[in-house]
Image (cartoon, grey):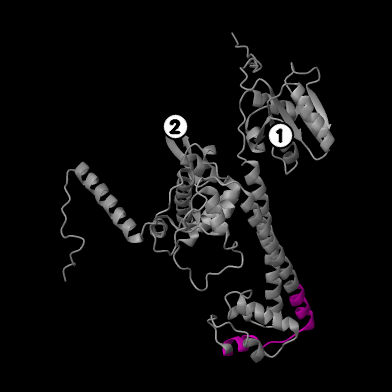
Amino acid sequence: MPVTKRTPKTVQIAGLPCIHLHAAGMDIGVDEIVVAVPPDADPQPVRVFRTFTPDLHALVAWLVACRIDTVALESTGVYWIPIYDLLAQHGIIPYLVNTRHVKMIPGRTSDWNDAQWLQQLHALGLLRASFRPDAEITALRTLVRYRAELIQHRAPHILHMQQALQQMNIQLERVLSDIMGLTGQAILRAIVAGERDPVVLAQHRNPACKSSTDTIAKALTGTWKDEHLFVLQQALVLYDVYTAQIAVCDAQIEQYLQAMESRTDDPHVPLPDLPPAKADSRTKNASPPATRAQYAQIVGVDLVAVMGLSASGVQTILSEIGTDMSRFPTVKHFCAWLGLVPRNDISGGNVLRSRTRKVVNRATQAFRQAAQAVARSHAAIGAYYRVVRARKGPQQATVATAHKIARTFYHLLKHGEEYRAESAAAYEHQRQEREIRALTRRAQKLGYTLEQIRSPTQAPPT
């Protein structure tokens, strides 16, 4: 007899237990917000509100009347920020969820409203809130991110000045490491002021400049053209405008840091001495000198003492992650959130792929920059970078070193301990001991024993 094919029955999930009984979902747009509450909370469980402030207050009042205690909303642009803050002020816990995470859960979102789908997923406990620091750190993050944007907007005008000089065959960048340094700015301002004699322009050389006056004068010999001089003048004016605004932004950040509540009982945290910086290591994007002491007073430990981290790097990291490390249960959670650990795809007990997760995180970038900064240092972290680079290449070495610095950062910030740097010689000695122990275990497994021919301090035979 022929076998009759039957259509499989569709399993309904309506009977699943709810984790959040009083949960709502929001689909946020530019002009309107669609809100969905449980069907038994209101006769009209789905409503549409405008994005004006009075409408947002009416939306929150309706949620309070429906006894809603948590709301799931997608992170679309910056439109979610006003309603997010308003929900938090009224004691409603907002869950900011990643749009990609919602799409990974199968569901017929085309037949239901997105807000209803978010409400159902949130009620079942299938959504996870994204990390967001407290209000005080969020305000600091806004200022720090704006400062970084000012630096980015200033950079193209430096390129405009370089192009204008190159088209006049003024090869100033060939004799100066930075045309916006002390010597470079003095020469550029003299050119804009009307000076054209290369010998006179070369007299603006700073004594710390490596190039001689004759070399600089030869590089300043070119063809002066009015159109390129006009571009040079305009670019220099815009560079000064952005530099002034960065200084104003630094003053605002410093004022805000002074008003922040200290996270430690000791108002005077000792600052350990850092190794002397190189003479040519000054940067025009560095934070003010008082930034290091202010952050040490806030968190109770000097994080700039960590090898590779600068005051600007610590400022970026703290403005992104905050100072409360209890948000990350362990250091592994912290490094996984940063995307500095491999993500293993395992099937049948076999690792199919092992790669780091792609994240767009300013804190991760700061840790990677710190890892690159210690590549040639004489500390243990620098020796670790060079060992990994020799085995796996520079990219893997940067990630591994950034991971190591992030673990140190987490430990210091959570426990408030003082950083103690380890020398490269001590690290190399420990690494050799680990290799000897590993070789000893392997030899014993094969039935052999290791015998030391000479002591490490004994000179090799001639």
Q: Earlier in the sequence, mark 2 or mark 1?
A: 1
Residues in magenta? 214-234
Mark 2 — residue?
348
Residue 373 screen position, x and y as percent: 49, 61
Q: Residues within 10 Å of mark 1 (few under 14, many from 20)?
A: few
Seen from the viewer's position, the closer of residues 33 and 397 is 33
Residue 109 screen position, x and y as percent: 72, 28
Q: Is residue 142 visible?
A: yes
Q: Is residue 232 above or below residue 145?
A: below
The three-letter code of the residue at mark 1 reads Gln
Quadrant where the image shows the C terminus: bottom left
Q: Is residue 243 above or below residue 436?
A: below
Task: Examine the image and state in which quarter residue 307 appears.
Answer: bottom left
Residue 46 screen position, x and y as percent: 79, 24
Seen from the viewer's position, the closer of residues 114 and 428 is 428
Residue at the image position 48 percent from the left and 43 percent from the top: 414
Mark 1 — residue?
89
